[in-house]
Amino acid sequence: MSARLAVIGNPIAHSRSPALHQRFGELTGIALSYEKLLGEMETVEAQVAAFFAQGGLGMNVTLPFKERLYHACTHLSTYAQAAKAVNTLWLDDAGQLCGDNTDGRGLCEALLHAHGLHLKDKRVLLIGAGGAAKGVALPLCEQGIAHLSIANRSFEKAQALCTTLSAYACQALPLSALSSSEQTFDIVINATDTGLSNTPLPLDASLIHAQTFAYEMVYGKPTPFLEWAKAHQLAYADGYSMLIGQARLSFAQWFGVMPPVEHTAFTLTDSNQPE
Ligand code: NDP
């Protein structure tokens, strides 16, 4: 019998999750079906409950329900608690709803496997303090990076995120600090949604050195951040590899098997790999 999976969001037609998980099923020999569910604002919790009551094995959650369904879970992983958002749901043996957030570990996986970057001792600049940034901040720190700087338009949100990372070397910056910097970064991650609105960020060349890697979380389109990276001859990538990384970890949660890294999938992204 094939395992039943789904992704819930609104809108949902664009989701690439079904194709990714079908491919993982083929690669691991696990029979599965994966559907797209259009989440309803009034009834999304009931939709999730009905999916599992009808035998669903696992569900991914995408915008705008990641924070809301966090509150529907009885059990939450450390990463879901840190992000206050879930992207992966399943039931435990007692039939209680469990939630994880695999976005951040998915990014770390992608940086290592798709882009060959070891995070240990790296100086990282994370731009943004919204849901995506909250999801990646703790997993980045856990990789043994030397330092995390978090810059955000609303400075107080960057400060609040840094406060949750008191065990690590973390510094909050106003966005204006990116216009001129006395320190350079090894990795610059754009976790804002400015790529969707084509809004440039105030990024100065003093932030980077010749080996800096630039990562844009938005995927599938040119963005001002990617253009900036190209203009400065940086190695760069868009967020498609992160999408694959978080999906691999969701699959591992449901089936106990990590899908093999499939390098062909990563080549679909907009990227310029380090030498
Ligand atoms: P949120 O709405 O939670 O946060 C948006 C962030 O962008 C905030 O930090 C906000 O700053 C900042 N921002 C918005 N407009 C501007 C601007 N004009 N100038 C500077 N900063 C701005 O969104 P998410 O964090 O959930 O998502 C961010 C992006 O990450 C999305 O585009 C999403 O597609 C992508 N993403 C990609 C994933 C992947 O797998 N590749 C996974 C998850 C997300 P402020 O706080 O001041 O409002």
Image: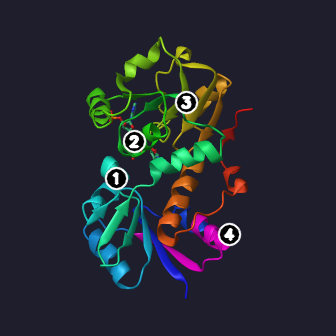
Q: Residue at x 48, y 74 (%)?
A: 5
Answer whether residue 221 is visible to the viewer in this image: no
Q: Is residue 35 magenta?
A: yes
Question: Would you name the residue on which mark 2 appears?
Answer: 138
Kindly report the distance in space between the C-alpha atoms of the residues bearing marks 4 and 2.
30 Å
Mark 1 or 3: in front is 1
- Amino acid at pointer 2: Leu
Judged left or right of residue 5, residue 173 is: left
The label number, if any, that marks residue 187 in the structure image: 3
Q: Residue at x 36, y 45 (%)?
A: 131
Work out whether mark 3 precedes mark 4 in sequence or the reverse, and give the earlier one: 4
Q: Is residue 268 magenta?
A: no
Mark 2 or 3: in front is 2
Question: Would you name the residue on which mark 1 appears?
Answer: 78
Question: Would you name the residue on which mark 4 appears?
Answer: 27
Q: Pointers 1 and 3 in contact (CB under 8 A)?
A: no
Q: Pointers 4 and 2 in contact (CB under 8 A)?
A: no
Q: Assign a secondary structure to mark 3.
A: strand
